[in-house]
């Protein structure tokens, strides 16, 4: 693993990018917020930027509104070195918006404006298949599965990436308010489960998908499928658990002063993918995998120390500094 060398394999991230409106005051409900600041967001886009911030190569595939916000978001991707030739603009629909408040405990409450938003209208015909075929890793969530035509575009992109030999990475990134029902969310999230090579779920998502309130090995392994290479369960300030065919274990978190958890999971995923894109043998070597997961946990931790996802995504140097401090 080249610690200082940058990854050369392309990581393509598929799905939504939107604007989060965050209250100017923390710890209040949306109704009580005196004002809002706009912050670019959307988990797959966050992952794409997390990768480039760490010196990796990434591209984003999705659809934005042909509006000021859409062009602003495309600009942010480009400024951050993310390849933007997989982006489409919709003339008829707006870029998605989400109002997100940080409650007093640092957790988030969401209210979405999408009916429909541009990201939901991406069609299979609009996909940049050449870009998708050039991916070493293809990463996606589940929000793009909620409605057609975006669902069909998602399935097509996944199939094309898989045929071209990409490693498929899945972070369901559950947002229950966007789904018609919890049952539908569970069913659709599981509908593409057995296609992924790497899956990352949070402790909350594990409970939701298994219907169990236990965050233990048995519960996690009930989500295992035969083609899976790595299953990760992130535990917030408790680190993460990892499972492969041959071994499993846990990695401790780093203790930092948490301000905002937005983007921490995306930062973790971006770091992991950047480290394995050119060397997938890491997934079969427990000592090296643990080292990569510690690095990923450090990236996730740093992201919680600042407000907003993208501004808080760390560089390699910042992550290595925290790793050194954490191990001394």
Image (spheres, rainbow, N blue to C red):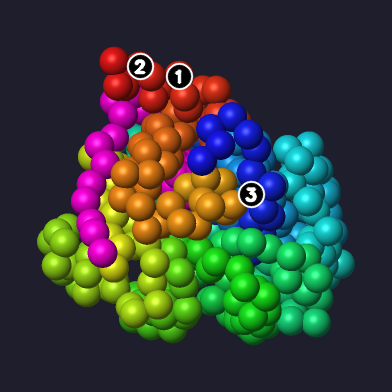
> Is any atom of residue 79 visible in this view?
yes
User: Residue 134: horizontal and vertical position, in percent?
Assistant: 74, 65
Q: Quadrant of residue 131?
A: bottom right
Relative to 29, residue 317 above or below: above
**Left-right relation of 146 to 189:** right
Sequence-wise, which precedes: disc 3 or disc 1? 3
Query: Which residues lie in the magenta part?
Result: 246-271
Q: Quadrant of residue 190?
A: bottom left
Q: Residue at x 39, y 25 (%)?
A: 323
Residue 44: x and y in percent read 59, 56
Residue annotated with mark 3 = 48
Residue occupying image coordinates x 14% and y 67%: 218
Cα distance in 3D space between marks 3 and 1 = 22 Å
Residue at (47%, 24%) from the top-left corner?
Answer: 320
Residue visible at 45% across and 69% down in the picture: 197
Task: Tell me the tag on residue 236.
Answer: none
Q: Position of residue 299 (x, y in %)?
A: 46, 34
Q: Quickly name the residue at label 1.
A: 321
| Left or right, residue 258 beside residue 32 | left
**Marks 1 and 2, how far apart at CA:** 6 Å
Closer to the N terminus: mark 3 or mark 2? 3
Circle 2 crowding by C-alpha within 10 Å: few under 14, some 14–19, many from 20: few
Question: Where is residue 12 shown, x and y percent of the image?
Answer: 66, 59
Residue 281 in magenta stretch: no
Kind of element beneath mark 3: helix
Looking at the image, can residue 208 be seen? no
**Residue beneath disc 2:** 325
**Is label 3 in contact with label 1 (beta carbons under 8 Å)?**
no
């Amino acid at each position: 693993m080249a610690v200082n060398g940058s990854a050369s394999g392309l990581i393509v991230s598929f799905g939504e990018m939107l604007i989060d409106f965050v209250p100017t005051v923390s710890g209040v409900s949306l109704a009580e917020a005196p004002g809002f600041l706009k912050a670019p967001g959307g988990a797959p886009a966050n992952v794409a930027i997390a990768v480039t911030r760490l010196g990796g190569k990434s591209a984003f595939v999705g659809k934005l509104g042909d509006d000021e916000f859409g062009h602003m978001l495309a600009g942010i991707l480009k400024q951050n070195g993310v390849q933007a030739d997989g982006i489409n603009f919709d003339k008829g629909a707006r870029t998605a918006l989400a109002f997100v408040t940080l409650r007093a405990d640092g957790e988030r409450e969401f209210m979405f404006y999408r009916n429909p938003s541009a990201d939901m209208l991406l069609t299979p015909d609009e996909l940049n298949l050449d870009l998708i075929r050039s991916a070493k890793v293809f990463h996606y969530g589940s929000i793009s599965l909620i409605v057609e035509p975006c669902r069909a575009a998602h399935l097509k992109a996944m199939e094309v990436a898989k045929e071209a030999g990409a490693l498929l990475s899945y972070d369901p990134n559950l947002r229950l308010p966007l789904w018609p029902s919890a049952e539908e969310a569970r069913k659709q999230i599981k509908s593409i489960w057995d296609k992924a090579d790497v899956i990352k779920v949070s402790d909350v998502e594990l409970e939701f998908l298994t219907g169990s309130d236990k965050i233990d090995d048995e519960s996690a392994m009930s989500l295992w499928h035969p083609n899976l290479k790595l299953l990760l369960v992130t535990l917030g300030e408790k680190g993460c658990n990892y499972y492969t065919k041959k071994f499993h274990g846990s990695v401790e978190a780093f203790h930092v002063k948490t301000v905002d958890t937005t983007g921490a999971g995306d930062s973790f995923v971006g770091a992991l993918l950047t480290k394995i894109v050119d060397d997938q043998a890491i997934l079969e070597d427990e000592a090296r995998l643990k080292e990569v997961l510690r690095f990923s946990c450090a990236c996730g931790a740093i992201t919680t120390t600042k407000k907003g996802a993208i501004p808080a995504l760390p560089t390699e140097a910042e992550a290595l500094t925290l790793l050194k401090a954490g191990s001394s």
